Amino acid sequence: EAQVTQNPRYLITVTGKKLTVTCSQNMNHEYMSWYRQDPGLGLRQIYYSMNVEVTDKGDVPEGYKVSRKEKRNFPLILESPSPNQTSLYFCASSFGTGVREQYFGPGTRLTVT
Amino acid sequence: AQKVTQAQTEISVVEKEDVTLDCVYETRDTTYYLFWYKQPPSGELVFLIRRNSFDEQNEISGRYSWNFQKSTSSFNFTITASQVVDSAVYFCALSEAGNNDMRFGAGTRLTVKP
């Protein structure tokens, strides 16, 4: 089954404790992206990647890191999480560039206390 | 910079009513793409439609229709004869061909009451 998977689905952590949210897709998509969803703000793009070893900042990249060492994986790293990073995070992927239909993962709800 | 505005934060209708969700966008690019996504209460994001800037034809898919008007920079979404299952948050989004990033609106929460 074609899908985007994220892990973990739920995470509660404390300020400053490094964490990684994994994202994997099995559709051989070139483009992958991370978004955060906050009430009243919709989805905001954090980082995106056009292909292996190619990443670029989205709208709200501060406090986040990403890497794309393999085509199927695009982990999101929070080196020192803060409470303002409490949010619902979505990973997405698509063929080609970012102008195509994106397939979204199920979301990761992160709470930073 | 590109921008998407969904001015309607919440809409509530009674089943079988028609409802239109508004989307206004801003871009300096001549080639761009517009999208609508649905987020039902279960939380996943579901793709509904993609339109490029050179195709202003309206689209109809069952009870759903989309009206793209470049003159007013709008890409509105109409649900005809709404059903309870249409209750969801709907997002409009814009991607410029030269950019590869994606800009979403704040979303409109639609509640359809039986």
Image (spheres, rainbow, N blue to C red):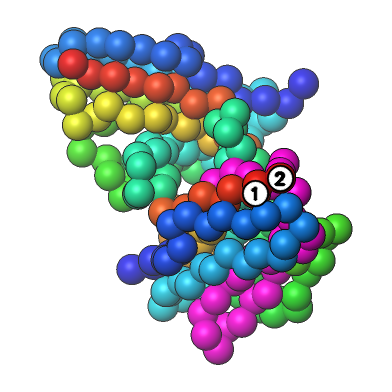
Above or below for B95 versus B47: below
Residue at the spot 65% in from the left edge and 47% down from the top edge: B113
Is-magenta flag for residue B72?
yes
Picture residue at 59% right of the left edge, 48% below the top: B111
For residue A78, above or below residue B70? above
Asked which secondary structure carries label 1, the reply is strand
Q: Is residue B45 left or right of residue B27?
A: right
User: Residue A2 lies in what quarter of the image?
Assistant: top right
Q: Which residues are magenta?
A: B66-90
* Nearer the observer, B43 or B85: B85
Res. A16 visible in picture? yes
What amino acid does circle 2 point to?
Pro
Amino acid residing under circle 1:
Val
Location of residue A108 in the rendering, given as x and y in whole percent from the top left corner:
44, 22
Badges 1 and 2: C-beta atoms under 8 Å apart?
yes
Which quadrant of the figure contains the C terminus of chain B? top right
Q: Residue B100 location, x and y as percent?
A: 48, 55
State the residue position of label 2: B114
Q: CA distance from mark 1 to mark 2?
A: 7 Å
Q: Which residue is mark 1?
A: B112
Above/below status of B8 relative to A86: below
Work out whether residue A75 or residue B2 is closer to the camera in this orientation and state it.
B2
Q: Chain of mark 2?
A: B
